[in-house]
Structure formats: structure tokens, C-alpha cells
């Protein structure tokens, strides 16, 4: 069995550790009736690969729709969710979301977001967890997203180190 050089192993470790430096951001949305989502993305720069996590109660659901369905509060969904916490990966262009339950969409429970074409810059980071948002009241926010990102980083780094040793062993 061939023994890999230290340079090969070190290069692999560095590459695997740098991979998490450019990461997607998750934006939490409290999906409720009576909240205005009209300017939700006005202070955000969204990129493909970022996600929006919609949290909602049993009286609501979430549909990803086309512009015409969004404008008319129709029922033709590209994808539908009803699990109470739905994470949707963003793709380039404008994305449209509605609550198809009853007249919720007609009463303003709809969101459109503009997603850029390029990948995120290296300093693209999660929104501050303790900062209030026009969509999610400060009391409803939690540190779960920040803790989750931190835990994910540790898992990626740990997994990278394990993979580096595996690749080194396999030569």
C-alpha cells in the first residue's frame, strides 16, 4: 500500500477546511397571517444556494409558485409544503411563495424574493440572530439558527479531517 506524501495530505486538508468558508445563509421567516411580506427582501442580498426557512402553524402551508399564480393567488404550485417548518433552497431569479389556505394569499400571506445570479462572496454570513426583523418579532427569534450553523461548521471540519485521513490511507 502506497503512503501518500505529507504535501498531498496537507493540501487535501487545507482544501477541505476552506470549503466551508463560502457558505449559504438561511433566512428565517415567521409565516403568519397579518404580517406584511411586501418589503421582506429589501435589506437582504440573496444568492443561489441560500435558503429561507418558513415556520408556520397547522392553519397554514407553503407553496412555491410561478408569478401568475402569485399575482392571482392561484393554486398551481411548483412545490408544496405543510410540515410547519419548510426550508426552501433559493435559485437565481425571482421566486414566489404563497399560503394557499383559504384566502390567506389574498390577505397578504405571500412573498416574492429576488435572488442574484452569482454565488455569495466569502463574507456572506447569516443575518444577526438577535436583530429584529419586520417579519419575525424579536421575541419569536431564537439562537437556534446560529447554533445550528456553528454545529454544522464543526461537523464539516471534523468530517473533512476524517476524509483527509481516509484519502491518505487509501493513497
Image (cartoon, rainbow, N blue to C red):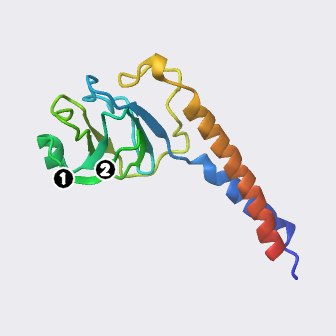
Point 14% across, 46% down: residue: 74
- Which residue is more in the foreground, 153 or 65? 65
Residue on which the image places disc 1? 76
Label 1: few (<14), some (14–19) or many (≥20) C-alpha neighbours in 10 Å = some
In the displayed image of the protein, which residue is found farthest to the left?
Answer: 72
Residue 80 has which mark?
2
Residue 35 relative to residue 84: left or right: left
Q: Is residue 11 visible?
A: no
- Which residue is more in the foreground, 158 or 110? 110
The percent coordinates of residue 126 (x first, y second) are 52, 35
Reply above or below: 118 against 171.
above
Label 2 secondary element: strand
Instruction: Please identify the quadrant where the N terminus is shown.
Output: bottom right
Residue 163 has which mark?
none
Examine the image and state in which quarter residue 2 appears.
bottom right
Residue 1 relative to residue 163: left or right: right
Point 31% across, 42% down: residue: 62
Q: Given contact means CB atoms under 8 Å apart, are the residues at marks 2 and 1 in contact?
A: no
Instruction: Please identify the quadrant where the C terminus is shown.
Output: bottom right
Label 2: few (<14), some (14–19) or many (≥20) C-alpha neighbours in 10 Å = some
Q: What is the total number of numbered labels drawn onto the structure image?
A: 2
The percent coordinates of residue 32 (x first, y second) are 32, 28
Point 40% across, 24% down: residue: 136
Reply above or below: 16 against 75.
below
Residue 128 relative to residue 34: left or right: right
The percent coordinates of residue 146 (x first, y second) are 59, 33
Point 41% across, 19% down: residue: 137
Residue 92 relative to residue 28: left or right: left
Tell me how far mark 2 sits from mark 1, CA to CA.
10 Å
Amino acid at each position: 500500500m502506497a503512503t501518500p506524501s505529507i504535501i498531498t495530505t496537507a493540501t487535501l486538508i487545507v482544501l477541505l477546511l476552506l470549503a466551508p468558508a463560502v457558505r449559504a445563509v438561511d433566512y428565517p421567516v415567521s409565516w403568519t397571517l397579518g404580517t406584511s411580506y411586501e418589503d421582506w427582501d429589501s435589506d437582504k442580498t440573496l444568492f443561489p444556494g441560500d435558503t429561507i426557512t418558513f415556520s408556520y402553524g397547522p392553519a397554514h402551508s407553503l407553496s412555491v409558485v410561478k408569478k401568475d399564480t402569485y399575482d392571482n393567488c392561484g393554486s398551481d404550485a411548483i412545490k408544496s409544503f405543510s410540515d410547519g417548518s419548510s426550508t426552501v433552497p433559493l435559485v437565481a431569479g425571482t421566486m414566489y411563495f404563497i399560503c394557499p389556505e383559504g384566502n390567506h394569499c389574498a390577505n397578504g400571506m405571500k412573498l416574492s424574493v429576488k435572488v442574484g445570479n452569482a454565488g455569495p462572496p466569502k463574507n456572506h454570513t447569516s443575518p444577526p440572530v438577535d436583530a429584529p426583523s419586520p417579519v419575525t418579532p424579536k421575541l419569536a427569534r431564537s439562537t437556534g439558527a446560529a447554533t445550528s450553523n456553528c454545529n454544522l461548521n464543526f461537523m464539516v471540519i471534523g468530517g473533512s479531517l476524517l476524509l483527509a485521513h481516509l484519502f491518505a490511507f487509501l493513497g
